[in-house]
Image: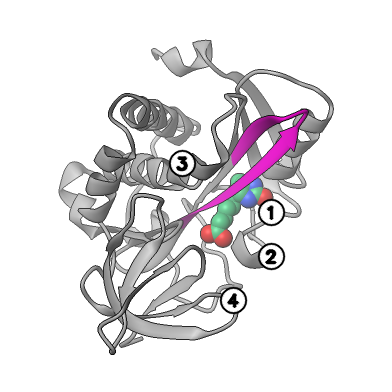
Amino acid sequence: MYLPWLKKYNLLTFDKIDSTNSEAIRLVKAGVRGDHVIWASSQSVGRGTHGRRWTSEYGNLYLSLLLDRNIITETLPQLSFVTALALRSTIAQIAGKEKQKLIGLKWPNDVLYDGKKIGGILLESIKVKAQNYLVIGVGVNILNCPTNLDRPVTSLLAEGIVVKKYGQELNIFMHHFDKFFDKWQNKGFGAIRKEWLSGAEYLHKTVCINDGNNNITGIFKTISKDGTIVIKLASGEKINISSGEVANKST
Ligand code: BTN
């Protein structure tokens, strides 16, 4: 198998670890330099967004990318969209290209399959001596579905999709991540944003967003140049929200 991404990243593998994101942060704090992929077969304290636990039994994909590239702070959230596109392509390659239409991208960091959550992204950044390091945590349900989420979840297995060879999904993901990262660097966020919007869940529909303080209801108009979601309120006013949980108003 040809694995060109291995020339760019140091690969660290674990049978079991607390959290691949936590390991990436420990590496940064210990002064380790260079881009890394931290891949674990299971996690004892897998972390999700909003302080949730990410159930991490054997059989799913758990990885963190540690990027030592001093990406400027304002553009860090854009990497969530880059990663979501790589995840969509990964799942489509495994499931079969004709299934791509079933894969939805839910702002800001979820990947859905037939409306059910199948993967998530946890972006964390850490600054050491004025240098920004980015940690992109990726979880994909392959054999198991987490049971602690209050929304529909699924796995590739539950959808009748089989990953034929262990580790294949990591290689496929890294291939696509590299491709979309290059696109982001060479063509800018505009190209990524356009492609992401083509697979966006709830676009032009009424959604309810909890931004941590309030529930905001309105029409999901677009994603702005800085990655915030643009919502049109009933008053006609358009507002930008930078983080929160999106639900389709009908759910
Ligand atoms: C979400 O809540 O949707 C984000 C889930 C991110 C889970 C992944 S699994 C690998 C990496 N390590 C962690 O502890 N979390 C991320």
* Extreme-left residue of the structure: 98
Q: Earlier in the sequence, mark 1 or mark 3?
A: 1
Name the residue carrying label 3: 79
| Residue 10 x %, y % | 62, 18
Per the model, the C-alpha gap separating discs 4 and 1 is: 22 Å
Tell which circle, 2 or 1, labels the residue nearer the N-terminal end. Answer: 1
| Residue under the point 20% across and 72% down | 204
Q: Identify which amino acid the numbered label 1 is placed on.
A: Gly
The residue depicted at 46 percent of the width and 51 percent of the height is 142
Image position of 212 (left or right of 226):
right
Q: Disc 4 marks which amino acid? A: Gly
Q: Is residue 236 above or below residue 95?
A: below
Earlier residue among tags 4 and 1: 1
Mark 2 and mark 3 in contact? Answer it, CB < 8 Å.
Answer: no
Q: Which label's residue is closer to the chain start, 3 or 4?
A: 3
**Residue 58, horizontal then vertical, whole percent:** 62, 48
Q: Which mark is residue 46?
A: 1
Look at mark 2 in the image and give the residue it sits on. 51
Q: Nearer the viewer, residue 236 or 75?
A: 236
What stretch of residues is rendered in magenta?
Answer: 119-135
Q: Mark 1 CB in 8 Å range of ligand 1?
A: yes
Q: Amino acid at mark 3?
A: Leu
Q: Nearer the viewer, residue 155 or 109?
A: 109
- Classify the position of the C terminus by image quarter: bottom left
Residues packed near mark 2 inside 10 Å, few (<14), some (14 to 19) or many (20 plus):
few
- Verify CB contact (< 8 Å) between mark 1 and mark 3: no
**Residue count near mark 1 (Cα–Cα under 10 Å), binned few <14, some 14–19, many ≥20:** many
